[in-house]
Image (cartoon, grey):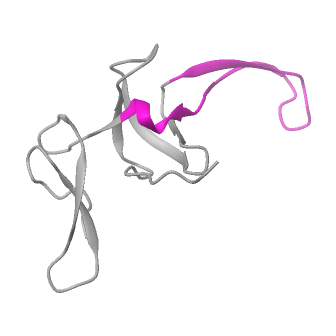
Amino acid sequence: MNQVKVPLKKGDLVEVIRGKDKGKRGKILSIFPQDGKAIVEGVNMVKKHTRPTQDNPQGGIIEKENPLRISNLRLVCSRCNQLTRIRRERVSGSDFRVRICKKCGEIIDKV
């Protein structure tokens, strides 16, 4: 599968726009661009049954986050607190490209 161009980064606040967790917000813990998926804190929780090992002598049932498709996530702007898409622009006088909120024009990446 081809790598997907991902407009999101680790640590971004996102909201789920489709699926069983629609409307939930959380921070991105990790991104897998080759799969087009991301793990969001507290969203898409699953229960995993584990047997006792040296690391976990008790074993039992563990709740953890499962990856979500990136297409089901939308970035939340920190200034206007709305779901938004982003546009990219170069910072004047340098080669940096920053992400900008399409609704309020606020720079999302602080340089």
Picture layout, residue 91 above or below residue 74: below
Q: Is residue 49 magenta?
A: yes
Residue 5 x %, y %? 45, 54
Closest to the observer, 74 or 108: 74
Q: Position of residue 55 (x, y in %)?
A: 85, 38
111 in relation to 31, above or below? below
Residue at 33% over, 19% down: 23
User: Residue 57 or 44: which is nearer the viewer?
Assistant: 44
Q: Where in the figure is residue 78, as x and y percent of width and height?
A: 20, 44
Which residue sits furthest front?
2
Question: What quarter of the picture does the C terminus occupy?
Answer: bottom left
Residue 66 to residue 35: above or below: above
The residue at the point 17 percent across, 59 percent down is 107
Residue lying at 35% horizontally and 24% vertically, measured from the top left: 17
How many labels were placed on the picture?
A: 0
In the picture provided, is 91 more to the left or to the right than 40? left
Q: Position of residue 50 (x, y in %)?
A: 83, 22
- Quadrant in the picture for residue 94: bottom left
Q: Magenta region: which residues? A: 44-73
Residue 36 among magenta residues: no
The residue that appears at 45% across and 17% down in the rendered structure is 19
| Front-lying residue, 77 or 18 | 18
